[in-house]
Image (cartoon, helix red, strand yellow):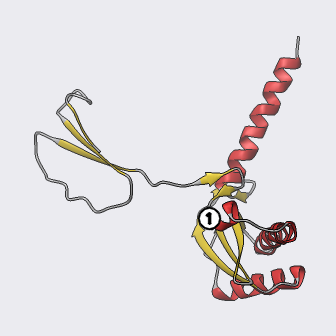
Amino acid sequence: MFCWEPNLLDTQPLFCCILSSKKQVLIHNDDHISMLVRCSDLVDVTSKGRILYGQAHFGEFSPAELDMQKKIEKATKKEIERIADMFITNVDATLRQGDWLVRAEVVGRNVMSPEQIRQVEAGVSRTTRHQVDIHVLSRCELMVTKQRSSSVEDFTKKLMEGKKGSQMQSQALP
């Protein structure tokens, strides 16, 4: 989508280009026109969280398989968060041809190593008594304060809970 916005910044015309995915754009250099490229990176989310495996959100599972899916996701979260300064932000488990596949997003002080993934897989398999194959999107990304480190999601959640608590206290006061 393209739009032309004359005098948007009260300086010179601005040509705005909005892309629905990350693409390379050739920007022409012109002294009379500025160009702003905005990329919209689409993320699909359900009440369960970000969709990593569509089958995990929309697939048809028996009650026993649904129970095992929850156990595997919970065990994966527990095993990953045993590692110092690693936080899992999303996890999906799905069953394909009799095998459990797990995909997780993890943030931390470092990216996870293949050895750590093998250890997590072994721990999850021990806990659930099912073989799992885990793939992790691992990023170095933490919110760090003078007291602690946490994922951005956990930091924001605690911040919002604190605001909600203070609002409730102020409403209770005469």
Left or right: 136 as drawn, with respect to 43: right
Along the line of sight, the residue nearer the viewer: 110 or 24: 24
Q: Residue furthest left?
A: 31
Residue 98, image x, y percentages: 74, 84
**Quarter of the view holding residue 53:** bottom right
Q: Nearer the viewer, residue 98 or 151?
A: 98
Question: For the point 71% across and 58% down, which residue is it?
Answer: 150
Q: Residue at the location (15% across, 41% down)?
A: 33
- Quadrant in which the N terminus is drawn: top left
Numbered disc total: 1
Above or below: residue 97 compared with residue 94: below
Work out whether 156 lies above or below 138.
above
Residue 29: x percent and y percent?
13, 51
Residue carrying label 1: 54
Instruction: Identify which residue is drawn at 82% across, 66% down.
Output: 66
Whether residue 108 is visible to the viewer of this picture, yes or no, is no
Up-down relation of residue 38 to residue 62 (above or below) = above
What crowding class fits label 1: few (fewer than 14 Cα within 10 Å), some (14-19), or many (20 or more)?
few
Whether residue 71 is visible, yes or no, is yes
Quarter of the picture holding the C terminus: top right
- Disc 1 residue type? Gly
User: Label 1's element?
Assistant: helix
Question: Of all residues shown, which one is farthest toward the top?
Answer: 174
Q: Is residue 137 left or right of residue 58?
A: left
Task: Report which quarter residue 135 is drawn in.
Answer: bottom right
Q: Nearer the viewer, residue 55 or 173?
A: 55
Picture residue at 62% right of the left edge, 60% below the top: 51
Q: Position of residue 165 (x, y in %)?
A: 82, 32
